[in-house]
Structures are given as structure tokens and as C-alpha cells.
Amino acid sequence: MKPPSKTEAQERADQIRAFERELQSLEHERVVALTEEQRRAIRGHHEALLTTLADTFDIDRSRREKQLSLGMRIASFLGALAFAASVFFLFYQFWGKLSTSTQVVILIAAPLLSFLATMVISQRDQSGYFAKLAGLVSFACFVLNISMLGQIFNITPSDKAFIVWAAFAALLAYACEVRLLLVASILCVIAFLSARMGTWSGMYWIHFGERPENFFPAAVVLFLIPQLIDHRRFSGFASIYRTLGLLTLLIPILILANWGMISYVDADPDTIEKIYQVMGFVLSAGVIWLGIRKEWPEVMNTGNVFFVIFLYTKFYDWWWDVLPKYLFFLIVGLTALLFLVVFKRFRKTGMLGVGGAGA
Amino acid sequence: MGTALILATNAVVLLGVNSNRSGEPDAAVTLTERELGFPYRNVSARENSGLALRVNWRVVRMDRRAGEFGLDSLSQTTWLDRAKLAALGFDVTEEADTLEGKRRYRKMLPKEVLVVLEYDGEAHRQMVGQAQRLLDGETALLAEHSGEQEHVKRVKWATQELAREQKTSSRLFVIDAGTDHGELRAKYADRSRYIIARGQIRIAVTDRAGEPPRFSGIVQGVAIESVTVPLEYRSVLDPLVPGGPSPGLDTSPRYVVTLHVGRRLEPWIAGIRGI
């Protein structure tokens, strides 16, 4: 059966290599001995499969190829950011010397041409690195397009720009399977939904960040998207939705747990902080449980991180000023040890699944 | 689909621009360098060949007494009283001298409203009058304490303040706010003197020792912060930009700008000429 995504194809290739190494070990220890015919059949099947997977998904067939791929990913990421920055600065350098109509034509043509170029490149580039570069440049051109039109014509800033940027980034992300663009799209969606929440509550939209509760609806929406829409064909997309959804929920709760004054709730700030602290503990523990149960390692890890942060900030509040520092850090270390013991017990009793939906 | 999204978004933006600039402008005011000044110079300006003039707006501040130094809040006004704040949609039923009241007002976020900017009108005359009274007061104090350096300094400072108000400070003042454009325009009908723009009002709590806490309105910002200069007018301003003198006490404004504000309350420059 053909794997639906590059991740699954890469996992299959890694599985084949691991199988070959394990088979060698078993033969060396005389546990099993394959006949020449069996060996030829397995080798032939694996070769054909790896060739097909490499042609279709451009997977890494060896450890060396894997290391080179990592290097290419880093180069692609840095190159994409640099090109995007270059687009911005290039326009800023010369726009003052152009007439308004020329500025408008260039601003509209840039994202159009770069979008078309991205589509052409993504058809021809199996590896996806060049498509990622082109896609990010196209997104940068579109952001520049709208923001510069706003400057040229002195248009009142609006949160609606975020939703069109989100839509364009999502389009590119899904067309070219670029996770960085999905992250850009999600960040724009978060900004838009939170700004809308702020506007509906009566504030000027630019101040949406001053009320962290504005982010909660966006968090819920993001977390539910991969549950409602199948993302198996898009490697790592589901994990990104879940992780960013959790961050959008837990970071505001962490802020409110320490700064109750900025909550919508009209109550004593100390009381608000206590409520959010309890909520933070309960939610992060719930997230850990959910991550273990559903075999979502990114969810479990995010829950872990925030549980520890909530715990250590409470330790700090209770004991930093009262205990000698060595004792404070001893308690922190002992707590970490306790976590280790608990997780080891989980592992032993098989509560952690083997493997999982990796990014 | 990407192509359609790009084209559709740009069409919406440009149609909005056209809608803003069609018909009679909501305001057409001739301002000078005092009100529309060059941007503050910084490193990034070298990387940016565009030019946007900075809108310098002010509010009439509370009268300062002779002998008092110190900075007043430049955006605290006398006309944003309780009734006005209530009319703008703020819940101001609580008193600021209770713990709950103080907390509630400190938590309140800015609201977007419509503000009225007056050019070279009564507000500016008030400020000139204040500066004159301040100078008269300091001069009288100097006469009582003749020779004292402190009072000599104060008279010099008050003289400079008056000169600033008369010659170089902006004459564009935020004088009113509301939520209905029609009502505001009916009240301030002169489109060559009054600009209606979007702005933000915030509540501030003043809590000084020895005085009961009180809240007041602050003009947090005006949506028109800067106006981009089109290429056709750059020839007037470009010779003035790098190394050009900023208006000091003895320097008059070097240019006038005809500023139009459209139906969507978005401005554009309709003309610039040197003085």
C-alpha cells in the first residue's frame, strides 16, 4: 500500500534499514538462517520499494543522505527568511522614487508572479526545498503588497489584513506542503480571531494582546481542526495545529496566573491569579493524559513543559524568599526526580504507546 | 485560487481608496510644517526612500501656574469629563476613590471613537494666552525676587515657551470626541478648519499624595499619525530633508500642505508648496 505522506515513506525506509541491520545480527547470532532465494527476494523487494519511495517522495535512503537533508532544510529555512527580508528592504529602498501607479503595479505584480513561480517550482521540485523558498518569498510579497498599499494610501489599520494573509499562507502551505507557511498562517489566524474577540468586547482591536482571554477561542479552533479534517497526507501539519493550539491556550493562562490585573474578569487580581493557576495545573495535566492516550507526543511534551513551568513558578512564589537557595534548588531537583520515577512507572506499565504520530 | 485571492484583495483595497477619495472631501485643510513635520530621523530612514510627514496634534493642557515646573500630561484634557466619557461608551458610574473603582479604571482599555481636530482656532489661542499669563507671572515673581538666578531662568524659559506657542508649536488640537460622524460634522461644519478622524480615548487614574484619586480621559492616539508624500511633491521637500534646519525659535515653517480627508476619514496630500 502506498504511504500517503513523505513522513510515512521515510518511516518505511528507516524500517527497512533497521530490518536489514537486525537480520544481520540474528544471522550472526545463528538465531535464523535465510536461504539465498529468500535473501534475494527480500533484497529485490526492498530495492524496488526504496526506489519507488525515493522517486515519489525524495526520501533519505541512508544516514549520510539524512544528514545532508538536515543541512538542506536548514539552508532552505535560512535562505527563505533572507529572501523574504530582502524583498521588504528592496522595496523600501526604492519605492520613494516611484510614482504611485508604478508602486501599485509592482506591489500587485510581485505576489502574483512569485505565486505562479512557486506553483511551477513545486511541480518540478520533489525535494520541496526550493518550493519552500519560493513559497515564503511569495508570502512575503503578499504581506508587503497589503501593508505598503496601506502606507501609500494612508489606510486605517485593520485586523482584516490578517485573515487574507492567513488564507494565502494556508494555500501555499497546503499546495507545497511547507510547514513554516502553515505556522505563518496559523499565527495570522490567531491574531485575527483574538483581535475580533477584542473588538466585540468593546476595545480598540490593536490592544487585543492586553486581554489574554481573547486568545482562548482561537486555541480551541486550532486544536480541533486536525480532529475534524484528515491531515494524514500532510506530514507534520496535525502536530503543528495541536502544538500551536495548546501554546495559544497555555501561554495566556500562564500570564494570567501571574498577572490577574489584565483579565476580563472584574475581581480581585489575587483571586483571578489563583483561579488561573489551578486551571493551568489541571489543563496541563489533562493535556499530558490526552497526549499519552492518543499517542500524540507533541501534546504530551507541551503538557509536560507547562506543568513544570506552573509548578516551578509556584515553588518560586512560595519559597524563593523564605528558603536558602541551596534548599530551594534541592526541592526543584527532587521534584524532577519524582517526575522521572513516575514516568518510568508509566513506561513499565505500558501506558506510553510505542511510536506515535510524529511531525 | 491564489491568483484570485491576490487580485480580489487588491481590488477591495483599491476600491476602498477610490471610495474614500470620491466626492467632496470630508475636510480640506491647509497645514504648515508646524503641523505636518518631517519624521524623526533614525537609522532605518537610510533604508527607506519613502517620506511620510508626521501629524503633530496636541490637546489644550491644564493651565500651569507661575513657579511651577514639571511636565503636564500632554494628552490629558479638560473636556474629557465624566459626562463626555459616558457619552463615548465608558462605564464611569464608579468613583475612583474606592479600591474597586481604582482597579476598574486602571483595567479599562482604550476605545476607538471619532475625534475632532481644530486647526489654528480657539484652542491655539488659549495656549498662547496660557503662555502669556505664565510669562507675566514669572516676570512678576522675578521683580519680587530680583537677581535670583532661579527666577531669571524661569523667565527665560517662559519667554521661550511663549515664542514656541506663537511661532513653532503645532496649531492642530484635538478639541472634541464623539461616536456619530454626522453629529460632529454638523457641530464643526467648517471643513477648512476642522478634521474628523478616528482616535482612541483611554481613562487614566491620577493618584497623588494628599489628593483624592480621580480619573480623567486621555487622548491616547489619533489614527492619522503620518501621511505619505506622493512622488510629485517630493521636489519641494527633498531639498529640505537631510541637513535641513528644523524649525527653531527663529525659523518659520518652510512649506504648506493641503491635506484632504475622505469619506472613510483617510487622508491624502493634495498639494505642497514651499514658503
Image (spheres, helix red, strand yellow):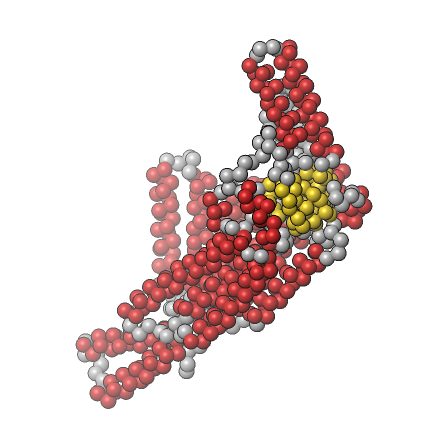
Q: Nearer the viewer, residue B193 or A340?
A: B193
Q: In which quadrant is the N terminus of chain A drawn?
A: bottom left
Task: Locate residue B187, reporting x and y percent.
Answer: 80, 43
At 36% across and 81% down in the image, what residue appears? A52
The image quarter containing residue A325 is top left
At 42% across and 38% down in the image, what residue appears? A320
Query: Is residue A336 among the parts visible in the rendering?
Result: yes
Task: Locate residue B174, reporting x and y percent.
Answer: 69, 39
| In-image side of B267 versus A4 (left or right) | right
| In-image side of B123 versus A169 (left or right) | right
Q: Nearer the viewer, residue B69 or A283?
A: B69
Q: Residue furthest bottom?
A: A37
At 43% across and 55% down in the image, what residue appears? A304
Task: Locate residue B82, reporting x and y percent.
Answer: 74, 36
At 22% across and 87% down in the image, what residue appears? A35
From this view, report whether residue A142 is shown above or below residue A120: above
Total numbered labels: 0
From this view, report whether residue B35 is shown above or below residue A3: above
Query: Is residue A186 among the parts visible in the rendering?
Result: no
Task: Locate residue B146, reporting x and y percent.
Answer: 60, 10
From this view, report whether residue A322 is shown above or below residue B259: above
Q: Nearer the viewer, residue A358 or A70?
A: A70
From this view, report whether residue B202 is shown above or below residue B10: above
Q: In which quadrant is the C terminus of chain A drawn?
A: bottom left
